[in-house]
Every structure is written in structure tokens, then in C-alpha cells.
Amino acid sequence: MITFIFFYFHFTTMDNLVLDYYTNCAEVCDDKVKKSSITSIKMNTFAWYCTVFIYFFHFYFRIRKICCLESLSKLSILDLHDNQISKIENISHLSELQVLNLSGNRISRVENLQGLNSLTELNLQYNCISAVTELACLPGLQRLFLSCNSILSFDQLACLGESRSLSELTLDGNPVALETWYKQAVLRCVLHLRQLDMKRITDEDRRMAGVLTRKEEEKKRESHKQTIQKCLLLTVQGNNFSAFSTLLFQIGCFHVFLPRLVETGSGSAQSLSLSDSHLAELDGDTLRLFGLGALEALERGWGVQTAGAVTVIAFRFINFDAIVPTLPRIRVKFPNLSHLIFLETNISRLPQLAALAQVRRLDQLTIHPEGNPVVSLALWRSFIIYRLYHFNLQKINGQEVTMNDVIAAERVFGTLGHIAATETPRCRLLLLLEESRKRQLQFLLEGRGRRAGLSPEELRDNGKLLGEGLSRALFNYPSRDCNEATVESSERAAVIEQYLQELVKRASDTNLKGEALHKLWPSMFAEMVKDCVLDMRDRGAFRRDSLAKLTETK
Amino acid sequence: MSRLTSAVPTEQYLADSQVLFYLNDAVTQLLDHKEEYTQFGLVRYFAEYFSSVKNSNHVLFREFSYIRATQHNRASFIRVFWRCFRQIGKSGDLLSVLEYRSLLQLLCPDFPLEVVRSAARIVLMDDATDCLMSFSDFIYAFQLQFYYQEFLDSVQVIYQDLLAGKSPNTVIVPTSSSVEQLMAVAAEENDREEQQQDGVDSSTLAECVDALCDRFKHSYPSRTCTREVLEQIEKVSYYGFLMSLAKHEGINQAIGALPSKEELLIDPEMDQELDKLIGQISVSPGSNSSGSAVGGLKEVQRRASPRRNIHHRRKIEVESDGSTEETDSSEN
């Protein structure tokens, strides 16, 4: 077997020469040569014969090694595709080489490329390449074709990022191209890439790459933190939301004492938000919130599907007064919510329980005795059943709510609701009710068009015109007593005081006048009668005087 | 024109009837909630405000400072509390201090615990304040404590004085806190517990209380009643004294908020209303109306026809009779 083929092309005078076996013709791309056509034809013919000869050999004998190119220092294009070359070597002196085509060979490593300072295109398709190295030494490399090789992972493409000039890259046909986020990962490595796998890179692709980078970093960070968290251990002593826990909150040392729940030992819990003082976890259909800061997890964007899957929300170590403002948001965001759990949330009064009416729907409610003093009150269960009657609660703290419970609750609180609904002055009602009911009440009180407005008495008689829910709806938390700036209210108080003083003064003056008149009236009346009688004594004169008066006044 | 002849000068009349206080509150509320009330109508607002004052409805859902401001308000509040929670008395539940306070808080969101605790102390004779109390005991004690709060504070000061052995004729400024502290310290030094059990000579106490009433600016229970109570026993302890005052029918009548003890749990109208409500619930147990306006209105229209009501009534009686026993047992 012929293992070496010598190129007897003494074209040292030629500046450029292209050797292209495949098409069986040697193209001369130098202008000078083209001009001298005779020489070129000669050359061509000669070359042609040579190439035929060589092609003949090529047909049977493929090139296995690159060598003996030392004299071709001005070579600009070297095309050795479809051979059996297994190693790139002996080309380092080709400093003017611009295009190197080594596709269809048996090359397994990209190496020995130093010195190719002018190289702009490197074609290594259809090889067995598994590792790419030393691309940084090709300062001008713009196009790199690595399709149909054996590159397995992005690690092996590590040096791609070092090439600043790379703008076209093909990697299709490699195992690595089948990875998810392949495009984005490549974009992350090679920032200035313009074409990948013969397709232009759009802005959208770049944006996705950025997002992916962030996501990956976050994932790494969180899994790291979770492993740390798994090592923390805590027990909080005491049943009440003791001063100790409150102190922890206040000084922000919560992370030191974050409890490790047994349930979240499963790997399916997805941590949504984690910091030193709070944790928000989504575990399938349960959303667990620990610590005050966890409430902000409710603010973030929730995908409709994820939000729709949540049926249980558990609050722990969050003050109930802080949870209340988020309930309207929860109502909107989680349409399938059916169970609320409260642990260590400092619910201490019955009116606070009324705040739960703001969610859309509730089948189960759990309020742990730990940290919730309200559970120690005997009537808390009845009150919840009464106030949240419209939810038709199935279970409270694991115990079923029976019809008897409902009737008993009504028996205890029914009168209260009835009196509240029928006897609270309407003006007070306007302040207590929430927006929708308030509007309804106002609507009923005013007349619109044909329908006359109802007076308060009529409204009282038809006390239930606003629906039976009114009596329950009056118990709201927080109650709508507005907290105004004290400056304003003290100013107002002064104004009111002054106004009332004036009022009193006017009233007492009027009263005084009335009294005085009352005292004087008899004598005044007597005088008036006396005057009249005296005037009318002389009838004739009186008549004349009266007529005169009349003509005057005309 | 008899109304113009005033037996009392204007200022005194105004002060007695506390008209200015109500007027002040009405105007303050008006200015605070301008938007709602201007739509409501100013004349209508004032009319409603004062008619509610007359009907004792005005204290519903008001803040504590308003409720305790006048005697009328206090009496109205006690009455409202009785009417709303009479059922608890009927069912015979015993509740603790915190629970009574939570019930009070449903009507008045910022009702303080102190008042309730003092009332509880009267009932329980200053024993462990976590004991359970019956509704009737509590409400009479609460009435006394709340209505005559200032008076009771002064009497306590006098009592401590007497315990400490001070002369009953010393002039005491009742509301001076420094004096009270002094008294407390003196009482502790004198082995308080023993002496409290023994109590104080009733006649001396009666004299002191009389003297107090002479110069007292706030309202106090009638002297005859107090004297009656003190005449019955020789030695009386502070809480014993208060407890007998609470139970005294004359004082109850004078306040006029609650009926007498025998009639405390009786209110047939309200019972009817309650039965109606329970009937509605029993009939429509699965109603899932979220309290929306439309749902509410629909239900109302169902209720409006009288024939339906009667039908319900009969049904109610049967059901409620049946369920009462069950609920009793389940409550226990």
C-alpha cells in the first residue's frame, strides 16, 4: 500500500493554489496566474494529469497522514476531505491558510492548530471528534463546522467560549445537540455566535439563553441551601406564641431556629422562596408558608396551572393580622383552595376568625391549639360555623361539622346576628359593610327612577331585604374604624367644638328671647288691645284715618 | 307655651342630658365619613342618629370610649349584650372571663379585659379568676361594674382605707392614683389576706359610702339600696358587698337595662325570631350561597310570602324540638 504520496508541485512561485481532489481539477485562484493563461493551462493540464493520477490513487488509496506540506507556506486553502486522516498535524507552518477542510476523515481530536493565524474556516464534519481544544489559538476563526461527530457534552466544548471571533458554528449530528436547552447552552458559551447549525440566532434565542442561565444559577443556589437547611434542627418550646418566638421574629434570628418538618423530607417539595427568616414551599397541592416574609411568595407570578393545583395553604409562625390583608389576593389567585391551616399564628379573638370569610371557598379549616389562644375559647367553633355558614364547612380541626353543630351555632349567635342586622342604625351599617353590600344598601336607600328610595323604617321592616347574609357580614375583621392622622382629628375636634358652641349660643339666645317674650306677652297683648280700642273710639275719625293711610300706601 | 319655661338653666340642662356629647359625636362621625353620609343625606343622618340614641341602638359596634362616655350608653350596651346573648344563658353554658370578653368584643371591637375581669372578680369573690361563670351571675355583676365603675373604684379606696385602719373621716380624693397606690402598699403591709376575709364593719362602711355620695360627681346607686345591703350583715368584705349590690333588685330597676332575675331568660319575641332563623337553616342545609347580593335577594323572596312562613313555622317547631335534645348533649 502506498502510504505516502508526494506532491511534486513545485509551485513555489505561485502565490495561491487550491488543491481540490474531489472535482479533479486544480483551480488556480491567483490573478497573476490567471493572467498568464498559457502557463496556467499548461499547469492545468499538467496538474490535471497529476490529479488524475493522484485521483486514481485516491480512489483506491486514501490519505492517511498529512505531511510534506512544508514548502507550501503560502497555501490559503487546504481541502483534504474524505480521506483517512486520523490526526491533524504538520500544518502549523501554514500561516496564510484561510480554509481548512478535513471533513470525512477519522480525526478524533482537534489539536495542533497553532500557527494558523489566518484561518477563518475550519471544516471538521463527519469525523470522530470527541474533544475540542485549543481553539483560542486561532485568532481569526469565524466558521467552525463540527457536524456529525461524537461530541457528548458541553464540557467537551469548553474552549469554544474562548474564541472571540467565532460567528458560525454547526454541531448538529452530535450527541450533545440532542440535549435540552442545547441551543441556549451553546449561546451561553459562545456569545457572539451568529449562526448555529446554519440557522440565524435571533434575539429571542439570546433572551432564552439569559433566562436559562439565571434559572440554572437559582437551582444550584437553592439546592445548596436546601442541603444546608436539612442540617438545621429546631424545637420551639411552649404552646403559645410565646414571647420567645416573638422575640425571634423581632431580631430576625428565625433562620437559626427554622424547624425541619418531617413532611418536607420528600424530594418533591419545591422551595419557592427562602431566606434567613422565612420559607415558602410548594409540595404538590400544599403551599406551606413559614415566617412573615413567606407571604411575599403569594405575590409572585403564579402560572394558572400551578395555582389551580393548590388546594391547601398552611401558615406557620406568621401573625394572623399580617395574613388578613393577603386573603383577598389568595381568593383571586387560588380558585381551588379548600383547606386552610393555621399554626402559631396568634389568633386570639373571635372577630379575627371572621376575616376568613374573605376567601372564595373553604371546605376544611384547621386551627392548631399551639400558638392560637382562640381555640381555648369554648365558643370558637360555633362562631366559625355561624360566621362561615355560607362556606358549608365540612371539617374543623379534623372533626366533622354536623347539622346539629350548625343549628347549635345558630342558636348561640343567631340572635346576635338578627339584632345586629335589624337594629344597627343604617348610617352605622354603611361603615361596617364591605364595598359590595354597601353599594347595595345605598342603592336601596336612594330612589332611582320609578322606584322610590326606602326610608329607614321600611328597610327595618323588610330587615331581610339585604339577604340573610347581612347579619353575618356585619362581623368583619378588621373592623372598619379608620385610623386617621391625629393632627387632622384634633383640628377637627377644635372646629366641631367651636361649631357646637355657636350652636348652643344661638339656641340659648333663642330660648332666652322666647322666655322673655313669654313673660312680656301678656302685658304686650294688653297694650295692643288698649291701643286698638283707643283708636277705634271715635269711629268717624278712625274711618277717615284708615282711608288716608290706604291712599298713602298706594 | 310650657316648654319655654325652663326650670333649669340652659347650661345645666345641656350638661345633664349630655346632648352636647351626642351632638359632638354625630358631627365628628359625619366629618370622618363624609363620602358615605353625604350620599345618605344629612337630615336623614341626624334623624337616624338621634332616634337610635333614643332607642338605645346607638352603641352597636361602636368603640369602647364612646360606650363608656355616658350612663345612657352604658345602660344601652348592657341591654344589647343581654338581648344578643340571652341564648347562652338559656342553654346553661358556663363560660370563663376570656370567653365573655370575646363575646363582648363581637359587639365592641376594643372592649378591654380589665372591666370583664373586675366583673368576674365580683362573681367569684376574688377567687381564681379562671373559673366558669353562669350567664345570669355574670351579667348582673357586669352591669354593676360597668355602670357604676367610678363609684366602685372609690368604694374600693375607702375599703382599703378602713382595712388599713385609717379614720373614716379623712378626706379622700377618689380618683387620685397616687393615693390608691399608697393605699395598696399600706394594705399589703397589713397582712391583706387575713383582713379581707374578715371584712370591715358594715356601719362604718355605710357611713363612708354616704359621705362619698354627698360629694360624688358621677352616678352612684341609690343610698337606700346601699344602706339596705349593709344593714343585713355585720362585717362585710369588699366583694361580698359588691355581690349583694349586684343582686339587689332595686339597683337593677334603677339602672333599667335588665329585667329581674326571674325574667332574665324570657323574651318570647326574640325566641320566635330565632326559631325562624333556625328553621331557615334546617330547610336549606346545603345552600352554598357565598353571601352574594343576588343569592341573598333570591332567598329573601322565598321568605317573603307569608304562607311559606307559616308552613315553615310548623316544620320548625317539630324540628327544633327534636334537635334541642341532641344539641344539648352535643354541646356538653
Image: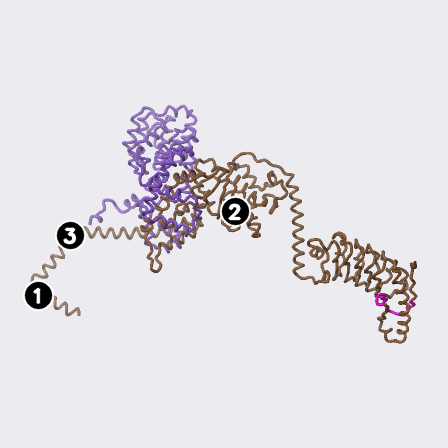
Q: Secondary structure at mark 3?
A: helix
**In front of the other: label 2 or label 1?**
2
Of the 4 image quadrants, the one containing the N terminus of chain A is bottom right
Q: CA distance from mark 2 to mark 1?
A: 100 Å
Q: CA distance from mark 3 to mark 1?
A: 29 Å
Stretch in magenta: A9-23
Q: Residue A541 has which mark?
A: 1
Q: Residues within 10 Å of mark 3 (few under 14, many from 20)?
A: few
- Name the residue tied to disc 2: A337
Identity of the amino acid at label 3?
Answer: Pro
Q: Is residue B70 magenta?
A: no
Q: Residues within 10 Å of mark 1 (few under 14, many from 20)?
A: few
Between B173 and B305, the one nearer to me in the picture: B305
Residue A422 % position (x, y): 35, 46
**In front of the other: label 2 or label 3?**
2
Of the 4 image quadrants, the one containing the C terminus of chain A is bottom left
Is residue B149 found left or right of A262 in the rendered image? left
Question: What secondary structure is the stretch in magenta mostly built from?
Answer: loop
- Name the residue tied to disc 3: A522
Residue A293 % position (x, y): 56, 46
| Same chain? Circles 2 and 1 | yes
Q: Residue at x 91, y 58 (%)?
A: A3
Q: Is residue B153 visible?
A: no
Residue A386 % position (x, y): 42, 42
Chain A's colour is brown
Chain B's colour is purple
**Nearer the N terminus, badge 3 or badge 1?**
3
Chain to which the residue tagged by mark 1 belongs: A
Q: CA distance from mark 2 to mark 3?
A: 81 Å
Residue B316 picture quarter: top left
